[in-house]
């Protein structure tokens, strides 16, 4: 899904309760989260505003509480989840949650209430699988001590560029 991915901290969402990162994939000039916002802002302006507000709340007031996320959207133990949508919401934003202090935002898109699973939508499936691959590669880098958590647990440290050598 990608050959290289860089973790980028989002300062406007990151605060004393948690850090929010997004990803820059391959040679893209725009991060995955910014693309998500640009792709959906015209059709779902109020939902984008709500998502941005919730992300700020997480970073500055509450941390990444488990009940803010729909867990188990990926493989067992990989942390891939979706930001919980409200009852009338149409957007799905995929992320990787690392405890209550760090989340990596991927992308997502429109998920009509008429479909039950992300596999029914090619874009949602692609965005989900990018994060599954990324989570696996981050885990490997952590095991190899190339990436680690900061002492206070609020940040990633080390080599935040993830190479996918299995990319075809």
Image: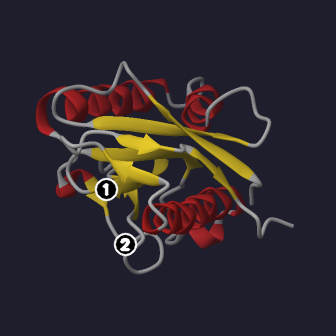
**Residue 57 x/y as whole percent:** 21, 29
The quarter of the image holding the N terminus is bottom right
Placement of 76 over or under 35, stated as above or below: below
Foreground pick, 56 / 115: 56
Q: Residues within 10 Å of mark 1 (few under 14, many from 20)?
A: some
- Provide the residue designation for mark 2: 72
Q: Secondary structure at mark 2?
A: loop
Placement of 62 over or under 80, stated as above or below: above
**Residue 160 x/y as whole percent:** 54, 43
Q: Residues within 10 Å of mark 2 (few under 14, many from 20)?
A: few
Which residue reaches farthest left? Answer: 61
The quarter of the image holding the C terminus is bottom right
Which residue reaches farthest bottom? Answer: 76
Which residue reaches farthest top? Answer: 12
Residue 98 - label: 1
**Residue 32 x/y as whole percent:** 61, 38
Residue in view at x 53 percent, y 46 percent: 106
Residue in view at x 45 percent, y 52 percent: 147
Foreground pick, 65 / 151: 151
Foreground pick, 15 / 80: 15
Q: Secondary structure at mark 1?
A: strand
Residue 53 - label: none
* 2 or 1: tag closer to the N-terminus: 2
Quarter of the view holding residue 2: bottom right
**Residue 34 x/y as whole percent:** 58, 28
Residue in view at x 12 percent, y 30 percent: 61
Residue in view at x 72 percent, y 49 percent: 4
Q: Nearer the viewer, mark 2 or mark 1?
A: 1
Placement of 7 over or under 87, stated as above or below: above
Q: Say whether residue 90 is visible.
A: no
Residue 40 relative to residue 63: left or right: right
């Amino acid at each position: 899904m990608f050959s290289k991915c860089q973790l980028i901290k989002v300062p406007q969402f990151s605060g004393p309760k948690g850090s929010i990162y997004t990803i820059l994939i391959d040679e893209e000039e725009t991060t995955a989260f910014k693309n998500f916002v640009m792709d959906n802002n015209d059709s779902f302006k109020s939902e984008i505003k709500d998502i941005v507000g919730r992300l700020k709340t997480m970073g500055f007031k509450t941390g990444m509480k488990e009940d803010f996320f729909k867990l188990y959207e990926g493989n067992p133990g990989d942390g891939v989840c979706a930001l919980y949508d409200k009852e009338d919401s149409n957007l799905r934003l995929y992320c990787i949650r690392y405890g209550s202090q760090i989340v990596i935002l991927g992308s997502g898109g429109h998920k009509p209430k008429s479909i039950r699973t992300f596999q029914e939508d090619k874009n949602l499936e692609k965005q989900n699988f990018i994060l599954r691959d990324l989570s696996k590669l981050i885990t490997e880098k952590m095991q190899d001590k190339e990436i680690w958590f900061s002492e206070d647990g609020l940040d990633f440290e080390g080599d935040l560029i993830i190479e996918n050598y299995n990319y075809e």
